[in-house]
Amino acid sequence: MMSVVQLRKSFADVEVLHGIDLDIREGEVHAILGENGAGKSTLVKILSGFEPASSGEMKLLSSSAENENEGELLKLENWNNEIAEQSGVVLIHQEFNLAEQLSVSENIFLGNEVRSGLFLNKKLMHDKSKEYFQVLHSDIDPDSKIHDLAVSAKQMVELAKAQAKNARLLILDEPTAVLTQQESKVLFELIERQKQQGVAIVYISHKLDEIEQIADSITVLRDGELIGNYPAHELSKDDMVRLMVGRELTSLFPVIPAPPADAQEALRVGDLGVSGTAGTSSFSLRRGEVLGFSGLVGSGRSALLETLVGLRKPSASSKGQVFLNGNRVKLNHPATSRDLGIAYLTKDRKGSGLLLDKGLSLNFSLFALHKFSKVLLDNRKEEEAFAAAVDTFDIRMKDSSVTAGKLSGGNQQKLLLAKVMEAEPGIIIIDEPTRGIDIGTKSQIYHFIAELVAAGHSIIVISSDITEIIGLSHRVAVMYHGDISGILEGEEIEEEEIMRYATGLKAKVVERGIVGRGVVEREMAEKETT
Amino acid sequence: MPKIDLKTAGPFIALIAIFIIGILVNDAFLSTGNISNILARSSFIGIVAIGATFVITAGGIDLSVGSMAAFISGCMILLMNALMDSIDSIVVIIFLAVLASIGIGALAGLINGLLTTKAKIEAFIVTLGTMGIYRSLVTYMADGGTLSLSFTIGDVYSEVYYGAFLGLPYPVWVFLAVAIIGYVLLNMTVFGRHCFAVGSNESVARYSAIHVDRVKTATYMLQGVCVSIATIIYVPRLGSASGQTGILWELEAIAAVIIGGTMLKGGYGRIWGTVVGALILTLIGNILNLTDAVSNYLNGAVQGIIVIVAVYLQRGAWRRGA
């Protein structure tokens, strides 16, 4: 359907794509693989007309009904997003492109509004939207506002938008990064149906399982070079990793030894209520332990831990108690938590983690800024600490004067980790440590976590990636509808069992009673000593 | 990197260009009297604008500064006149009025700050409201007319505006001191860094354990104190206050900040740029006074054009830099 020959792209004087060849056939899922910074996003932006190519050829098979000359050679200089969409080439961005305040149907027809006379034909747009959703097997109400929708529903709206544009070539940039496994499954079924209707799909993802499952052909990029085009059945997952990284990966997950039996309790949370939910949660964390938090998107994992560190107010009825190394503490602001040695790493590194338009060392020092100040800031000390962190966390950049927004996702994550670790917290809560990050950096981050644990830190990992949870955690707390439905240990930590708790099929109340009693006992003990 | 240099140097280049125009327009421009007059006049707007640089850098806006200046002037004059009966030393009276002025300024800033952060009302609305309140309060205090400072006090106090040290009027020294303190505070302290972070992305600031509400409130208080300092050196100039005092100061202050390269969207602030911005605004008025080519009544129009052009140039440089 679309073929590309010797496509090159330069920004200023730097060539970032060095001659890419690509053949996308009708009705196939064509995966593009590569580490962050390999050039995948640039490539799909060129295909969909968001960026002009610097040189090369692009051919697009015309939809035969409207055009006679098949396989028309595109003039690169004229190819833009508007023409691309008219020709049925639609890119669905990693970050969605929806107007939050508008309704679903208004978004679907944004820029393409159907009019009758002077006025908008709302009825027709509503009905058409409904039709699109029926084709997608989804029951989203076209009248609901985008900001009321879950992430997966927003993606559905994007797909419906693509339908409204009669997409023949659909480009999905990491579509499952924000989806749960269940939601991903729905997406794959949908991709399958689109395929059968002859739609070609270009698919970018870091999740090799998915690629193996749905791709028909695979193009691998590394550092802007084409490594090769392969039929999917010829590559195993190991092959994919080898081609992407250019080296063998030893083991993705390092071995993290369990804390000794007599390890002290670092944190105990009792009956903490999250605002907007009825439930309360209790759990504990020992020194040198990794506690995983699993659950579906929207199950309240981030909300719970953000409440713990004081980023959100607890529910009005919450009688939550938090003990740090056995001492009762009140964490009502992240600064208090930081000073007491608890740090939270947000999953939203672009929106809440880093100042994208600011420099790297300014971002790095922001969380622990008091360390670099007596009366005035000590810039030299700050720069030295930053240089040391660049080394420790292997942050790679063109030069140290770039802004944080210019770093690749993986390096942003490492910078965020460095920023939080600068405050030397004993307890680190990492929300989605590797979302949207290439496999090489992923492995690096897992090894950082292992090193931190070895150094006596305690870690809480929140992740939607079950493999990650299983690979890292000593115990796993699973959340369902705002409550911890179970805390799993040992043999229980296994994909299907976790899913049973995550979907509400199973639940056990283990910790709550213990915590309640533990707290009471401790308080009585305190009274006796005084 | 030349493009960044251009961005920082832009306001300075504009200042030099306008200065050269001034020299060409009228011989009297370069006279000591005129230069020190320009500097003294730019001090008021300049000091207020340095406060505004903090507010804007932290992502806020304060429209109430002009009315606040009028209100503080009124309070100072009423207080000094009232103290005449009970305190003999005029210097003590002035000193007390200065203290009161700073207190009122800080309090007014605190109110603006708390209304934006705790009551969660947009800064634009809050300060639009307080702007009306202070303006109306001073008119009420003056009973629609003018509050005049007693001549005995005025004679002593006028030294603050008309006196000079090393050939430069006192207001210029105050301006310089406020600018240096502002520069150090914004660029070399934790507070300044927090202002940049809050203005750049509030959510990131919150997740970075910054007390966002406190930082924002502090910028409004700082703004209030700057307004009170400007008022302290302004009162002896005329020795009176009315509903017309400090009119449009808020616009001139914001204009000075913007001309200086600080971005209205927050996250970027330049104190020296603001100082230059205030000088540019005063220079334009002065040059128009000295020439017949453009009517002095068009002062506001020329200032407006300069602001728009300045922002246009910044945006252009910004895009190329991004």
Image (cartoon, coloured by chain):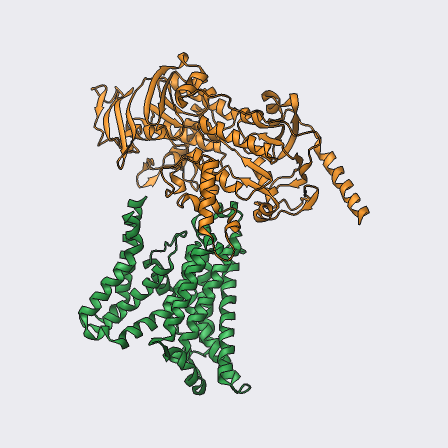
Chain colours: A orange, B green
The image quarter containing residue A78 is: top left
The image quarter containing residue A41 is: top left
**In the rendered image, is residue A303 in sight?**
yes
The image shows residue A75 at horizontal and vertical percentages of 21, 28
The image shows residue A249 at horizontal and vertical percentages of 46, 21
The image shows residue A287 at horizontal and vertical percentages of 65, 35
The image shows residue A339 at horizontal and vertical percentages of 59, 47
| Residue at the image point whose x is 49% and y is 22% from the top | A185
| Residue at the image point whose x is 41% and y is 23% from the top | A245
| Residue at the image point whose x is 34% and y is 41% from the top | A119
Quadrant of the image containing the N terminus of chain A: top left
Q: From the viewer's perspective, is residue A42 above or below residue A243?
A: below
The image quarter containing residue B17 is: bottom left
Q: From the viewer's perspective, is residue B79 above or below residue A279?
A: below
| Nearest the eye: B68 or A62 | B68
| Nearest the eye: B120 or A313 | A313
**In the rendered image, is residue B63 in sight?**
no
Q: From the viewer's perspective, is residue A178 above or below residue B313?
A: above
